[in-house]
Image (cartoon, coloured by chain):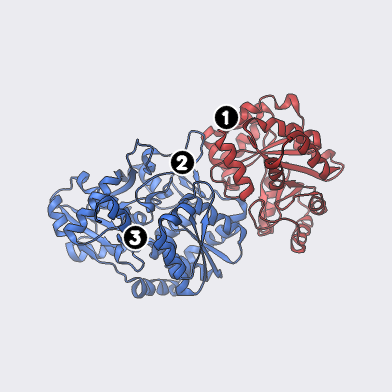
Amino acid sequence: MNRIDKVFREAKGPVLNIYATAGFPNFDDTMTVIKALSEGGADIIEIGMPYSDPVADGETIQMANQVSLDHGMSVAKLFEQLKDLRKEVQTPVILMGYVNPVLQFGIEKFCQKCAEVGIDGLILPDLPMVEYLEEYKSIFDQYGLYNIFLITPQTSDERIRYIDEHSHGFIYMVSSASTTGAKTGISEEQEAYFQRIAGMNLKNPRLIGFGISDKESFLKASKHASGAIIGSAFVKLLSKSKDLKKDIVSFTQSIVG
Amino acid sequence: MKFNVNEKGYYGDFGGAFIPEMLYPNVEELRLNYLQIMQEPSFQKEFHDLLRDYVGRPTPLFKANRLSEKYQTNIYLKREDLCHTGAHKVNNTIGQILMAKRLGKNKIVAETGAGQHGVATATVCALMGLECIVYMGAIDIERQAPNVARMRMLGATVVAAQSGSKTLKDATNEAMRHWINNPVDTHYIIGSVVGPHPYPDMVARFQSVISEEIKWQLKEKEGKENPDYVIACVGGGSNAAGAFYHFLDAPETKLIAAEAAGQGVASGHSAATTFLGKEGVLHGSRSLLMQTEDGQVVEPYSISAGLDYPGIGPMHAHLFKTGRAQFFAIEDDEALTSALELSQLEGIIPALESSHALAVLPHLKAKKDEIVVINLSGRGDKDLGTYMKRLNLI
């Protein structure tokens, strides 16, 4: 069974997914961050592959992308860092990134490497559904990779049904019309949107992301979904941390504890 | 061979709509409506009335006699430099602001490199009374102060793009982010034939008025519609798309695209995408793109800010791959020489971008009885600072 499915099947409380950019704050920190997140109790770990032009991301994650690229991070080097991933952690790991570096690496080779190191899913926000179904799905399936799709407050019900039909693992529910890290907290309007989607009885679980930064917003979002995703707030913590392992474990525990 | 966009939004292998879901509703709304809106008689009338009375179209097709004599052929200049705001860019912004109004949008966001598209957008926003935000790279804001002032005078808010390399590609990223954050009331006016489908096709259609006019003007002057050559510069490629559009299926007309080689194709300071790029995805479409082996976008260089873009529109990538258009890489110095040449032979100071198209002439070897049309996409006022420095005019 894909580790992502296992998480949702066995979850006793809301599922916590935390995003970190690979090679940030330092080039060699990727595995340190993953291990500490796992130890602290994150249910799913999302690792960002840095890109020069991350259009869906706000300032914080852009900055982390740039720092990581300045350190020389690449898709090939990330796979090198992840080669012993499954000797160390059993938490599901998703790679998030933009499609161009993946295309240059080679889509088949990329999926093969993902399977080799034990990646469970992918989030490629600028890979459209229609391209995925026509060109990529069969390759992703062959290597057991779940492609995670996003929905937003502007996504029509019809399209949400379509996305649900073609999704595995979970649906990434963007909490508001925004780039990552642009807003914090959850408004009444957003809660209404969460409730509307919850009422659609989709076949996939939903995780709510964007604007989730602490225990309060995590729990609030999780009332209307299977859990939530923290990104920019965690990247901010990484950029300030003097003791990564300790800070990550205590941050993660502060959310799930 | 088909050179226009297909129903899936592709030109051969290039195009598509590689956008995050947050942009999907807006782009889809545009995709579903743009052709129908453009074909409405009331839209056509308003668009063409504004092109005539506000932009000053048709722009002349001018026989450049002294230039023709020098190159021993028949050279016509399509005078887009005479458009209101000084370049072809306004053809597209007029079309898109009318589109935005019909889609019920009351705010406009745009990106700009040198500021020409920003000025053309700020201009039509003032004309229509819509709020206008223009993203411009922080570095470009410093080096293009007069255009920043123009946009502000026209009532636009100019926002510095501080991310990445702080130039055009980053301004485009920031404009896209702005649209993600303001999806309901805002229309994004992209300035070139780039971006997700349907933008490349929509912008090409608005700019196609250029080749539409060339055809009847040439018929009047030479008794035939199709020249032997059409030459245009390509950054993203909007003026070239407009100048080529009605000749795409006329094989007797050779299409020539001039890219900016900067300090030389192999110098590491270039923007010649078809020479240096590989297939990839940037700003929502699959095209040719200057990038590292790892797929990170490379910052281009050209003396001309309007050609300083790491990609080209998907239509041009297709024209390149199929051989329908021939691409030349023109260095900074060649463009400067041609700018001086046109100024002194014809009394027309061209934009640096357009000078790249003119600089194809020495390479072309057109025959004495052939007809060459060069799209003079913009005027040189904005480049006077560069000309003063590089041509020792002080």
Q: Secondary structure at mark 2?
A: loop
Which kind of residue does numbered mark 1 sit on? Ala
Q: Are marks 1 and 2 in contact (CB under 8 Å)?
A: no
Question: Which is closer to the viewer, label 1 or label 2?
Answer: 2
Chain letter of disc 2? B
- Give me the chain that's blue: B
Q: CA distance from mark 3 to mark 2?
A: 26 Å
List x then y, in percent, for residue A250: 81, 39
Label 3 crowd (10 A; few <14 / some 14-19 / many >=20): many
Say which quadrant the N terminus of chain A sits in: top right
Report if residue B234 is visible in the image. yes
Q: CA distance from mark 1 to mark 3?
A: 44 Å
Which kind of residue does numbered mark 2 sit on? Val
List x then y, in percent, for residue A220: 81, 54
Image quadrant where residue B288 sits: top left
Q: Are marks 1 and 3 in contact (CB under 8 Å)?
A: no
Q: Nearer the viewer, residue A14 or B332?
A: B332
Q: CA distance from mark 1 to mark 2?
A: 18 Å
Do the residues marked 1 and 3 share a common chain? no
Q: Secondary structure at mark 1?
A: helix
Determine whether, in the image, residue B56 is placed left or right of residue B236. left
